[in-house]
Image: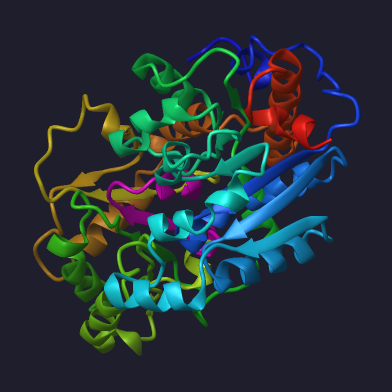
Amino acid sequence: MASCRTDECAMESLPATPTPGLPGVRYRVAFLFNAQLHQLMHGLTTAIALAADPAFDVHVIGASRAHLDCAGAMIARAGGAPITLSRAGSDMLDAIARAARGAVPLKLARLAGQLRHLAGFDAIALPERTSILLRRLGVTGPRYIHLDHGAGDRAVGFDPRIKLFDFVLLPGHKTRGRMLREGYLRPGAHAVVGYPKYDAVDLMRDPAWSPFADARPVVLYNPHFSSLGSWHRMGRAVLEAFAAQDRYNLVFAPHVRLFDDPARRAAAEADLAVFAGHPRIHLDLGSDRSVDMSYPMLADVYLGDVSSQVYEFLRTPRPCVFLDGQARAWEADENYAHWRFGPVLDGVPDGAGGLIDAIDAARAGHEDYRAAQQAGFAETFDLTDEPSSVRAARAIATFLRFDAVASPAEGGATASNRRK
């Protein structure tokens, strides 16, 4: 782990004290959410914090009406902020895209319709990588800022496209160290800021809510949507095991992308109808509660595979159980570092009580994993008493101000200069 902490080393080539930037300049910053609704949780509170600085004109651009409704609700819950909300795309584009491939319109189609609008910003902040194509599509003036999206171990989260961004926000030193090794980060072009999603979920989540009327321990089954996940090989067996017992309540809340296609979701709802009315099983195939950490905070035990949500769950150390249906040699593989946090099962154990017995054993033996969980969490999230969103906003502001002063003849953050 790096010896320096928080922003101290991550912004090593930026000035020690924030520069005021260019006199009279107001920076226009777009927070672009061009994917699934859950990505709002990774950047909206940073936008709210940045908008508190009068030198920044903040816009939030959402992929759908639902994005804007959610953003508006979060802004209101935070007490309001001078943020302009706008939509990428249209109802017609939504309808065409839904018919073609899913509930969220095609990213590229939305980008194509926003080129002129986005070219007018000094910076574009976004929590996904596809939209960096904007630069190749001719939107070369703005600086591109990557908002961290998740904090897992899988290689897919360490995307080579990260190095195409002008500035990168990171949750902790695990991610920073690996991205430096891969050559995706540059000195002065990244900052460790913690995890703004925690600020968002603390703002929106109802901590008193539960889908169950009794006090049985709750197990969260959270399979990932990728081929590495457990759902397609073991998911049905997991639900059947919990349906046949009376010691635990089960929340089945997979990654929202598992059933984000309407046709796939409808088929899953029909297939799982037998469990829908079960008093000890709660199914959530993609509601707002599946993205606001309601279930990771509610659960007593995490049952999963390769999702980064296990790290969110470990905000409070608790028992974990992992399902491996592919007999992986995972022990020395950093992509499965989180499997150190609990027992790993080679599939669902045989027998009616096999999986339930494994859950019992994980709870009884949790102390064997507590230290590893705490160390893994601390390495993943560099949290301080200051909200992560405030740290992220300050890092963006410092970068843009320094960039404008250091490169007055270039594009990007000096676009405001040209509009004065």
Report the front residue among 346 and 133.
133
Q: Position of residue 52 (x, y in %)?
A: 84, 45
Q: Position of residue 304 (x, y in %)?
A: 31, 54
- Residue at figure coordinates x 24%, y 87% from the top left: 270
- Residue at figure coordinates x 21%, y 24% from the top left: 332
Question: Residue 22's quadrant in the figure?
Answer: top right
Question: Residue 357's quadrant in the figure?
Answer: bottom left
Per the image, is 295 magenta?
yes
Magenta highlight range? 292-313
**Quadrant (top left, top right, bottom left, bottom right) of the C terminus:** top right
Q: Is residue 82 left or right of residue 213?
A: right
Report the front residue among 371 and 184.
184
Per the image, is 53 magenta?
no
Residue 191 visible to the viewer? yes
Q: Where is residue 30 in the image (x, y as percent from the top left)?
A: 65, 47
Residue 395 visible to the viewer? no
Question: Residue 231's quadrant in the figure?
Answer: bottom left
Report the front residue among 222 and 215.
222
User: Coloured how?
Assistant: rainbow
Report the front residue among 334 and 260.
260
Furthest residue to the right?
Answer: 24
Q: Is residue 293 left or right of residue 207?
A: left
